[in-house]
Image: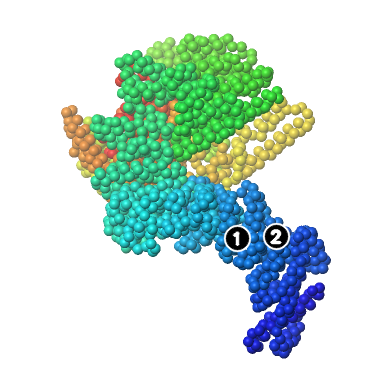
Amino acid sequence: MNASLENRELALFLVDLAVEWDTLKGDSGTQNSDSGESLIQASSPQGATGSPCESNATCTIHRQLFEESHLYRLSESEKSAVINFLVRLILLVAVGDKSQQLLRDKAVSLLQSVLTRWKGFFVLHIEYFEKVINMCSQGDSSFEKLGSVVQDEIPNFGNISAISVKKPKSPINRQDRALVVSNLLLSSCLEIFSHLMIEAPENDFLVMNCFKIFPIVNTCFKRITTVSDDLIQKSLKKFLVTLFESTVLRAIQEFCKLLLEDLILCTLTNVKDGKLPSCSPVLFALSALEGIVRVNSQFLNSFMVPLIKIAQIFPGKPPSSSMQNRHTSKSSYSSYFPVEALFQAACEDMKPSYSMKSDSCQFIQTCMTDQPLGDEEDCVVRSLHLIFKSFVPYRFSSLRRKFINLLGDILDCSTNVRILLLVSAQLGQWICEDCKQTPLTKNEVLFFLKKFTNFESRGLSEIDMQPLSYLVSLVVLKCERRRACFSSPALSYDGSSHETSSDFGSYSPVLNRLSSSSLMSSNTSIRNIFCKVMISRAYEGTGEDISPHHDEIFSGPLESILSYVLHADLEGLGNRMWTFVIVDSLLAICEDPTYSEAATSRYLISSFLEKECQIFPPYTTSLSSSPDSSVFLSALRTMTSCDRQLSQELLESLVKSVWSTLTDDKVRLRIVKAMEKTLNRTYHAQFLRNSRKSELRPRSSNGVKSFLQAVASLNPLPMISIDLLLTLASNYNCWHEVRSMLEKQLLVFNCAPREVAESYRLGLSSAIRRCYLDLGEKDVWLTLKAKDCTSPLLKYALSIDMYGKVQEALQRFELLVDQSESNSDKFVPTDIEMALLEDRWIAIHKETCQLTVLSKFSELSSFSKLSMECSWKNRDWEKLRLLCSSPAATSALELGDIDVKMNEIFLAIHDEKLHDIENLHAQTAQLCLYKWQLLPNVSSGCNAHLMLLRYFNRLVDIRESGQVMVEASQHTNGKSYPDLKNLLNAWRNRLPNDFEQLSVWDDVFQWRSYMFSAISKKFQWAEQSTLASLHDRPWSTIKMACTARRQDVIGVSLLSLSKLTDCAMDVNDAFSKLNEQILSYRYGSEDERKGGLNLINTTNLSYFDSIQKSELFRLKAEFLESLGGKTKATQAYCHAVQLCPTYTRAWISWGNLCWSLADLVETQGRRHMASSSAEDKEKKAANAKKVCQYLAQSMGCYLEAIRCDASEDSRINLPRCLIMLAKDGSCPGLLCTTFEKYATKLPSWIWLTWIPQLLSSLCRIEATSAKLLLQKVLSSYPQSAYFSLRSFYLERRDSERAKQSTVTKTTVNTSVLCAEDLMSNLRKCQPTLWSMLESILEELIIRFRPSYEEELLATISALLQRADSQIDHQRRANNSDEDAVRASFMKTLSRVSEKFFRVPNGHATPLKDQKAKKTLEFTMQYKDSFERDFFIQDDVKKKQLSLDDIFSKLNNWKDMLEKRVSSTPPIIPMTSMSQYLSAFSNNNPDLWTGSCDPPGSNSVESKKDSLENDKDSSPSSSAKAATKAAIVASAAVAAASALEGGGGSQGFGWTSVEIPGQYAPNSCSDAKPNPELHSKLIKFDTKVEVFQRNEHLVRRIGMVGSDGKVRQFLLQFAIPYWTKADERTTQLHLLLGKCLRKEPISCRRHLWIRSNAVIPIAQRLRMIAEDKSYTTLQDIFNLDCQLNGRDPLNSISAFNESLKTAVVPEESEMSLLNMTNKIDAFNKVCESVSSRLLSNYVQNRYATAELYFHFQRAFTLQTAMNCLLQYAFMVNERTPSKFIMNIRNAHVLSPDFRFSYTNQGFMDDIKPVPFRLTRNIQDFIGPFLLDGVFTTTIASASTAICKNEREIEQALQLICRDDIVSWYLSKSSQREGTQRSIQELEYQLADRVKKNVALIQSRFQHCSVKSLKDDETMKHDSCDYRVKELVSMATSTRNLVSMPSNYAAWL
């Protein structure tokens, strides 16, 4: 045995040869040569060490020996020697290198063979194991010695580590070597023992030596607990399985059994936090048990207790695989559809985790083995497998009870899919078994079935849920099959049924719930089967015997199926979009060919699908007639299961289809009850996870909202319970769906008699008010409240309250309260009115911060919520603590009252329970977030979230307050001071908006005031100066007072200031307090103003700086001016500007005084105008001079204020300065000189808004000053004025050339020369930019010019419109001078002929260009026909034409030209229009802020001066050097900026072409522009869109900007007056928008006006910014006519025909008949034109009620603003083509916004309707928004504008002056008559301008909110009654029929 390896191999070979000899001898004695050869070859030691040659020789010797000695046989002793030899050899070579390991394997194989042959007839000596037994008895030290010896003897021993033990690649130490040696020896011993038990069970070696081998087995078990060795575990497991298969070795079995139990118990004691320790042996023990159970099923009984304990430790542990961790981290909300979620997850992971296969077993097995198991997971799985195979489930005992509870816990808590699958699969097998075979009782079956229903709420991902859902579906399907077989014995079913009806009766509810869960399975087959199961459940209620496998499952009408589906138990789909079931069921009906009415249902449904959804392919004519309808419907069902948008559209269409087929009200009532039953269930999920991050049309967020959205579209509308609808609205965020349903019901009941269902009508009205109140629509809520009131006094008080007149509303409400308490006859309120009065009385007192009054009222009325609010504001903490613990507070807290929760936080902060603050704050924040989710989405103008946003703001303050209290406590103990500067600064910036209600401000400042007091109390030991830095009480109080004063609540302002009597403050705070006190008296009575003046005079000014002193003198001057002391006021202003020459407000106020003095002198001078005496003439001259002096002073003050600070308040006076220049007369005077002196020093950007006025000033005496300003603008912002300047130059040049013969040359060329000079300078300074712009404009003018046919068509259309207007005017004026009208038209037609058909000079010569060629072709084609039709050359026949003939021929020409023009394609490639624009490309530089500033504005010199003149700089040399370096660096940066921005030293950033319309007034702001941030033109869009607008063809081009956006522009040809009018409209919008932004009454309603960019290109060409989302009312009407096959002109023609028959003589008694005929004609047209065209158009765009309402509300605001401007500026001719709106944001444009003038130049205020509010607009707005939003918007905007009347008056005069001059110059009579200069024309029209401005202001005043006297309130119950009268006029049929026919009042 101590021989070398070669000798050992030879010995093993000899043993093998001897064994083979014995085998041959023992057999028949005949052995074929092949068998012997194979044995010899097999026993050859070639593989060990020998070479091939040696092997062949050895084989030859073996063969000879075999042949000669085949008769030899071994004796018993020899056999024992062989076996002992093999055992010894195995033990010796067990530890060695690779060669020895191979030798060992051969020896083991030979030993197995020998034992199999010789059985137990041998003697094995125990001595060979003594060494191993001794080592095991002595411990690991013996193995360490053996390991060192072996390493010395075997050089390659280190390689064994890779075979035996899994260790890191590092040098093996002594202990590791011992482990390797011991494990190899132990595994060899175990292998020998196993072979003895298997191949030689008769041998008694193990029986005789059982106690001696105990140490070996024990050591093996110990190794398992310390080292993870696969070899020893494998050997030991084999040994144990073999051992327990035997029935002899009882002692060893008991010993090993104890060792296994110890392993498991050891694991249970070492488990910590549900985690196994390293090298845990429990997995080996469980694996060994699994093997033992296969051979000995009874062995497992004693291990049940530890197995159950193991399973109880780990089932709740989260899944360990990466896949599980990835998916379970997502939201716990369920998704809409499983298939959709699976697809989303597959797209995210790029590969599916599971594949849906048809074979259930294969699918589940794939899910269970897809990922490797973790240790803990493996323990649970193995333990459960063992328990399932044991007796525990089948025997009632305590163990079984624990096991059943364990399974329930796993189903409840575990998130591990494999464990859940294992348990569910086994339970499903037991549930599906016969009742006599299953180990579960009936109650346990029901128990586990209920557990299956909770899988959806486990929070598992959709991917992980699929195998579970699939498995549960199979279980439920088997149960349903058994139940169906039991119910119908005729159905065949394998196996005998032992269940009774009571069994399935108890299971039915749970099975129904599980069945409903399977209705949305991702497996189509499962879904289809359970769809039939659900229908069968519905049939059970009717008494019919229908099974889910019956062929006639769908036998019943559509309405019955819908009712059945609604009655079905869908609790299993509560966390899904359960409305899909309705869609799938209705589609399944049509798909099933066995259904008797499938064809009829398919036809009914297909008609709606084709019309509503438009999802059918064009080649499919109808679903009912298509041969592949079933295939199509199957595909449609599959698509519906994964697309919620399609599912929602189908739901609405299918339900509408079924509902439309119902004719019996009883059937509808039954379905309505089913709807209520379904909606009233509590299992619906409030929130579903949206797998799509963004959607073009977002859909419903839960099933209830989805279903109500479908119900709301039904007609007639189902009458669902009002209380149920309100509950659904608040719990499922379906406010707008419920609101729309309630509104439709109320409109129906309003049309019914008053006495019919009055109580239900009142309930509807109350519910609608509740919806609007919760949605934040306070105006609508108050309007609806006022409608239900009977008292005019209360209605008026509510209207005053609605518009924010707090003081007057308080007086009115107090008066009403007094009258109600005194039982006065003037006001006898009902209970509803009294409750409303109380509510508003409380709200008004909150606004006025009257806490004392509210506290007394709350005590008397027991209003707990109000009491709590008053308690914390009054700092009565004990009372607040009692109120918070009251039952009312507890009940409110359960309902989710946020105020109660915040009161608890207040108490915690006051009590300094700092550990509770964070918890309470987190709870309150979560409550706010929960309520946020139950509100509609945030959108523009949506007020639903305002209250929650305020709560969030306060919560941030409260949390910071808690942190401050912690810091304060810490610093107080250490007598130090906290640093609260950052906190106080944050609190200053985190404030409500200035326009928000005072109650909101009071809530914030009351709490901060308490915190400041608490801090002062904690640090009361500190000095006053230090203590003042720890709080901000003075600033907060003054800010509150300032806000109250700006909102005209002076009482609150004074009350707030009175609280600062005991507070130390610095000089700035003291001045602010004094300033607020003085301002509070400014607009009071005379005594109050005197008090304010005395307060200023008694103030010590020595503490204040120059600006503060200047402000006090300014206020003193204002008080003196208001008291009549204008001279003293002038002196005070002089002192103010002397104290601080840069104080802007002082200059503005002084300028206002000078302006008022000039106006006063001018008014006095008008008295002497009628006198012609010399004295009066001298007085007039002196007054004129004095006026100019005052105006010059005023202008100087205004311009100096702008120079000091170019703020918006300063720039508002620029129009006043421009309007003053007209006072200089016919030559420049003092005003022009003053203007030129000061205006040229101002920044150039302030003139951008008024560039059109500066251009027109080039024609006046101030041309020199205007030219300088324009030159400055062009040098700084060339692209802001280039387009207007170019258009002005071309227009004036043509005009001057036309009148050159009658005016001197010098006068003619003044404006033209100025404009030409400006253009020349621009070309010199910016040659590159000028060249690019000229090239672009030249292409636009030439290439996009309309054809001659289009121009002629536009002219004829204008003539027809003019004809309609003139005829209508004559009818209204009872004037029938037809000859004059005919003569005028013939004269116009002659000019048209001359213009269009003028033969060009030299037409016989060859054509020079393409334009002349087109002109000649057009003339030759149309001239003769036109002159022949209208007798242009024949004066005799011309007189014979009647008006009807002229109009008829014009209409024929119009039709003919329209056909020609309509051939123009709608889309034209840019390449075919303009090669230059198509190839245009520009690369703009990357500019930074300031890189495009002009010289001087932000120049290096100014920076240098500021640095050199810095007084605070250090005088040291190093500081001077640093300053110099900074100056040099700034100069370098500025130079680089100029070079990069402009491409050169003269460019200044303007070489890149900008997209037009980014400067004021085309932009939304007139602040200083940042050209470097403007979007630069990169290229033009590749397509040009051509469409019709106002009966003209227009082109839309796209400009691609550097910001990536494509801006669309319309190219329109129009006369210059129209373009200028649109430019003035943009100025007007910008001006009025400023007024709206300044006033709280408009800011609270989010009112805004946005100007639309108008860019003049040439005299008759302009660009208007308008993208593709804009549409007109005429376009909507044309689209409807196109869909219905009607001609849009039929309505006008029908109306005109009716009017012809309605013409009556002039007798007065016939006028009434005339109006009646008009109304009849109007009503007849209205019958053919729907009033819901606009509503349907928007409904198709915005499918949900929420989006529809948001658009509807925004549209109402914009329409109201547009209507206000129409009324104020007399712009009434708003035809449908001029009513343009943006379908994306509801922005309403004002195109062709031209004032209406009479022939005398006054605004035409005699119009039948004030603005356009026709049927479609009124119907779309609706009655609720019409009263609550439309009316309030007009009144609020008018009030805001009237409050700024003085600031905008001169701007209106400037706009009206330019407009009337342009209008006058555009008249034909002006072109043909005497030519006058523009300035002379302005002098002539000056009086008309003033009257027009006065008329505009009076109309704004007419619409504004006005306070009424007591006697007026009885007649008018609202302060906005004038607006309501205007609305009535605009919607009156009598007024609408008086409009021209082209007005299309029926739209």
Residue at the (66%, 58%) spot, across then down: 259
Closer-to-camera residue (1799/1194): 1194
The amino acid beneath tag 1 is Leu
- Please tell me in which quadrant of the rendered image residue 1911 appears: top left
Tell me the element at label 2.
helix
**Residue to which mark 1 is pinned:** 289
Which mark sits nearer the N-terminus, 1 or 2?
Answer: 2
Against 1585, residue 1233 (above or below) is above
Residue at the (44%, 31%) spot, across then down: 1645
User: Which mark is in front, 1 or 2?
Assistant: 2
**Residue to which mark 2 is pinned:** 218
Q: Residues within 10 Å of mark 1 (few under 14, many from 20)?
A: many
Tell me: 1284 left or right of 1424. Answer: right
Closer-to-camera residue (1191/1300): 1191
Residue at the (68%, 67%) spot, across then down: 207
Task: Give the x, y percent position of residue 1850.
Answer: 45, 25
Task: Give the x, y percent position of residue 359.
Answer: 46, 63
Tell me the element at label 1.
helix
Task: Give the x, y percent position of residue 739.
Answer: 37, 37
Closer-to-camera residue (1282/1068): 1068
Residue at the (46%, 12%) spot, across then down: 1085
Residue 1941 at least partly seen: yes
Tell me: 1550 left or right of 176. Answer: left
Tell me: 1054 left or right of 756. Answer: right
Task: Give the x, y percent position of residue 1526.
Answer: 71, 35
Residue 1672 at least partly seen: no
The amino acid beneath tag 2 is Asn
